[in-house]
Amino acid sequence: MAFMLRQTTRSLPGASRFAVRCLSSSAHLQAPAVQTKSKKTLSKPGVKNVVIVEGVRTPFLLSGTTYADLMPHDLARTALQGLLNRTNIPRELVDYIVYGTVIQEVKTSNVAREAALGAGFSDKTPAHTVTMACISSNQAMTTAVGLIASGQCDVIVAGGVEFMSDVPIRHSRKMRKAMLSLNKAKTLGQRLSVVSRIRPDFFAPELPAVAEFSTSETMGHSADRLAAAFSVSRVEQDEYALRSHTLAQKAQDAGFLSDIIPYKVPGKNTVDKDNGIRPSSMEQLSKLKPAFIKPHGTVTAANSSFLTDGASAVLIMSEEKALALGYKPKAYLRDFVFVSQDPKDQLLLGPSYATPKVLERAGLSLADIDVFEFHEAFAGQILANLKAMDSDWFAQNYMGRKTKVGAPPLEKFNKWGGSLSLGHPFGATGCRLVMAAAHRLKQEGGQYGLVAACAAGGQGHGMIVELYPQ
C-alpha cells in the first residue's frame, strides 16, 4: 500500500495545495472571547445530554525529570484531588471512576482504584482501568458517557495517566519459569535441581515492547513510511513541529492552558507548567538526524512527540444532575466513534477514518466545525492524515467513500499547540484534547469541536464536543 499511496499522492491536487498553504509558525492566537454563533444543537430526543463540567491535568513533563521518583498512582491521585478542589464536588456523589493507562505498574494494575482511594474517594465508589493505547482516556470518557446515557450513573470521573520514567522491566521468560518452579519446589533436592538448570542467558531482562506486536515495527518506522507514502517532506514536518511549539509557548504565556493544576512534588519544587515546550528554528531543526530510518528518513526527535509523564481527570455528568447541583457545564459530549484499520500501512491514520464517520453520525460537515484538536504523535502523521482527508483517491480506494471529507483548515487546528510540544502521556492525552476543545470553543466563539486521535494497533477515535450555551 505504501508504494501505491506514494505514487498516487505525488500527483494529487490536494497534496500540492496543502504544501503551498503549509505551516506558518506565526499563526496568531485568538484574543478575547467572542459571541458564539448560533447553530442547531445536537441534542437528541429520548437521549440524555451528557456534559463535561470541568477538567484538570498535572503539568506534562518530560520523562526522567521532576516526576522521576514518583509512581503512576501519585500522578493520578494528584489529578483527582485537583479536580475535587476545583469543583468542590462531594466525593460521595461520584458514582464511578474510570481511568485510562497503557504501560501498567504491576503493583497498581487497577490504577483508577488505587488513585481514587489515595485521593479520598469513598471505598464504596467502584473504579476500573481501561487500556487502548493512546486513546485510553478517550475510552474512559466514552465509557462514562455510556454509563450516564444508559441511566446507570449520573456523576462519573474519567481520566488517564502515564508514567514513562519507571516502566516495568521483567526477567526473561526462562528465568520466570525457573523462579516459579523454585517457588513450587518442596525439598532441598528439588530446589537444587531447579537452580542447576539456570544459565547465564536467563538473566537477560525483557524491556517493554516498543514495537507493534502484530507487525514487529516501531511506531516511528510506521510514521516514516507514512510520511513517505503521502510525500510529506522533512521541511514540512519540521515546519509543523515548529508551529506546534510556537503556538504552545504563546498559549502557555497567555495563560490559556488553564486545565493545569500546580503539583508540589515531594522533596522537589512545585511544577506548574509543561516543560517540553521548546520553540526552536528551522535551521536548528534541520540539523537533527533521522531517528528511525537511517540515513534517509524524515522523522526526527524534534518532529515527534516525546516520552511524557502526566495525568488528567474530568468530571462528567448528566446535564440534569449538573444543573441540579448548581454547576455550569463547559461542553456537551456528543457523538463519538472508534475505528480500526490495517496496523501495518495505516497504523496512524485513525483520524482520517474517524472524522467522516463522526461527522455523519452528528449530521455535520467539516465546515460546521469551529475547533479541531487532533493528537500529534508525529508531525508526519498529522500531515499525512490531512493529506489523506483531502484526497478523493484515498477516500474511494481505502474508505469506500465517493468523495473526500476535506482537510481541516489550519487556522482552526491545534491552535494552542499539541502533543508534539505539550507532551503525550499515552493514557492521559484524550482528556487534554477534550478540555482544549471546550476552552477554545468558549474563547473563539465556536459551537462545535472535533477531537480525533490515532492509537497503536491501527485504531482511532473521533468525538464531537459542543459548547454549552453561555
Image (spheres, rainbow, N blue to C red):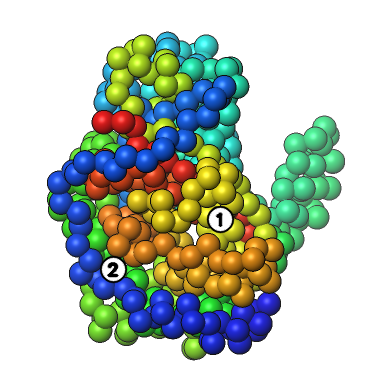
In the rendered image, residue 384, in percent from the top left (x then y), is placed at 50, 71
In the image, what residue occupies the spot 72% across and 48% down? 176
Quarter that holds the C terminus: top left
Q: CA distance from mark 1 to mark 2?
A: 26 Å
Q: Quadrant of residue 39?
A: top left
Which residue is label 1 attached to? Answer: 356
Q: Quadrant of residue 185?
A: top right
Relative to 45, residue 56 above or below: below
Q: Nearer the viewer, residue 36 or 275?
A: 36
In the rendered image, residue 73, in percent from the top left (x then y), is placed at 44, 34
Residue 243's disc is 2
Q: Nearer the viewer, residue 132 or 177?
A: 132
In the rendered image, residue 247, in percent from the top left (x then y), is placed at 24, 61
Badge 1 element? helix
In the image, what residue occupies the spot 42% across and 28% down? 51
Q: Earlier in the sequence, mark 1 or mark 2?
A: 2
